[in-house]
């Protein structure tokens, strides 16, 4: 649900990073926070447990500049990945405009990735949103573990598991090292802004 | 579903909020959507990151709504946090909006509540019109 403020010429959009526990959602936001100029970002807010697991969400707001005369403000959220925090995930999804699904490339996490994607589709459907129409990008995180003792899944297998039906843009990434983080953010922002621009044109016509 | 706030809507809301701030001696009043987005604010926000405050407020309300449901209540319609120098009063405005009032000990909780009650009906009417014409 983008907030379009015609008085201030400002649009606020909400992007949620979704995925199984420990897949790297918070690490994505931390990298963005640490590597973005201070004047275009707000404070990063995290509600987590002492074990560094997200309890409620992380939050970061970014100013993406102007599009068609409107200031675009993007609010990035993460959800807690653990299965039993489903009620919290539903709360964070309220008013979502776009989703980044962060998949863990570790072989042992294969089932959890699929379960989390199904959970996303179910929670969106409860809000009347189809996973097939909402702006969505998939990120295959932890690619830096390739060649180490930890066994990771090839991209082709992850694509088959998670993206064979959706066919959305996907990016290999290492959130810890920053690889693929901005590419993911750029793509989801582009999709969300495109979607919002389409809506502005519609609303503009309605208001005239 | 999109929410569009026109200049006319905003002027009416601002009028109510300014009246509320000056009559209650609060620092500031913010209106926040339940999804965590800031709609409008009036008064001195004390250099607070109001985007983060908006996100946390919505989360706070969402979490306490779950507590209310566990207790068999539909929702808690107001929350109050007392600090050493700043206090926060949260109140629900209909089903879509939360009003956040920041104030210090120069005024009282009773006066804040009284002034909120006085503008609440007017704000409810304006907001229900805005959210009632959500555009698909």
Image (spheres, coloured by chain):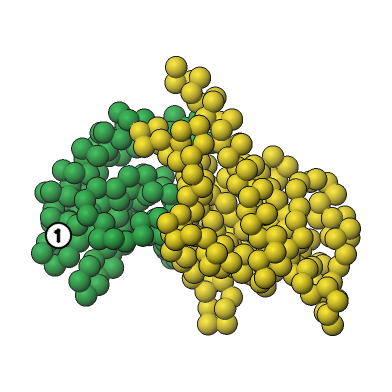
Chain colours: A yellow, B green
At 42% from the left and 39% from the top, the residue drawn is: A10
The one of A158 and B115 positioned closer to us in this rendering:
A158
Return the x and y of residue B95 as percentages of the image width and height. Answer: 41, 45
Return the x and y of residue A12 as percentages of the image width and height. Answer: 47, 44
Q: Residues within 10 Å of mark 1 (few under 14, many from 20)?
A: few
Q: Mark 1: which secondary structure? A: helix
Is A30 on the left-hand or right-hand side of B31?
A: right
At 46% from the left and 66% from the top, the residue drawn is: A45
Question: Which image quadrant is residue A145 in?
Answer: bottom right
The one of B57 and A66 positioned closer to us in this rendering:
A66
Q: How many marks?
A: 1
Chain ID for label 1? Answer: B
Where does label 1 land, which residue?
A: B110
Return the x and y of residue A130 as percentages of the image width and height. Answer: 68, 42
Whether residue B63 is visible to the viewer of this picture, yes or no, is no
Q: Quadrant of the C terminus of chain A?
A: top left
Is A109 on the left-hand or right-hand side of A9?
A: right
Return the x and y of residue A112 as percentages of the image width and height. Answer: 76, 67
Q: Residue furthest top?
A: A208
Question: Which image quadrant is residue A71 in?
Answer: top left
Is B87 on the left-hand or right-hand side of A42?
A: left
Q: Is residue B56 shown above or below B98? A: below
Q: Is residue B136 shown above or below B37? A: above
């Amino acid at each position: 649900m983008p907030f379009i403020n015609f008085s201030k010429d400002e649009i606020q959009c909400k992007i949620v990073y979704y995925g199984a526990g420990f897949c790297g959602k918070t690490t994505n936001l931390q990298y963005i926070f640490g590597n973005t100029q201070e004047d275009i970002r707000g404070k990063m807010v995290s509600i987590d447990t002492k074990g560094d697991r997200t309890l409620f969400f992380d939050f970061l707001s970014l100013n993406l500049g102007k599009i068609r005369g409107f200031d675009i403000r993007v609010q990035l959220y993460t959800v807690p990945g653990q299965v039993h925090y489903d009620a919290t995930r539903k709360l964070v999804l309220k008013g979502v405009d776009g989703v980044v699904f962060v998949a863990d490339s570790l072989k042992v996490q294969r089932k959890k990735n699929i379960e989390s994607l199904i959970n996303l589709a179910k929670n969106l459907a409860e809000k009347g949103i189809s996973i097939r129409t909402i702006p969505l990008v998939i990120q295959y995180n932890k690619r830096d573990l390739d060649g180490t003792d930890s066994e990771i899944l090839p991209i082709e297998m992850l694509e088959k598991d998670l993206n064979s039906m959706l066919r959305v843009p996907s990016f290999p990434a290492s959130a810890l090292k920053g690889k693929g983080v901005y590419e993911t953010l750029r793509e989801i922002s582009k999709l969300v802004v495109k979607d919002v621009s389409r809506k502005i044109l519609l609303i503009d016509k309605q208001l005239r | 579903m999109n929410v569009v706030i026109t200049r006319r809507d905003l002027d009416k809301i601002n009028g109510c909020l300014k009246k509320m701030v000056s009559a209650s001696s609060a620092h500031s009043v913010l209106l926040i959507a339940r999804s965590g987005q800031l709609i409008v604010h009036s008064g001195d926000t004390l250099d607070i990151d109001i985007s983060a405050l908006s996100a946390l407020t919505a989360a706070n309300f969402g979490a306490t709504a779950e507590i209310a449901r566990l207790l068999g209540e539909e929702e808690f319609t107001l929350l109050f946090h007392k600090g050493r120098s700043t206090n926060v009063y949260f109140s629900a405005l209909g089903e879509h909006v939360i009003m956040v009032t920041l104030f210090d000990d120069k005024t009282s909780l009773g006066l804040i509540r009284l002034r909120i009650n006085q503008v609440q009906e007017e704000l409810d009417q304006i907001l229900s019109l805005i959210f009632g014409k959500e555009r698909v």
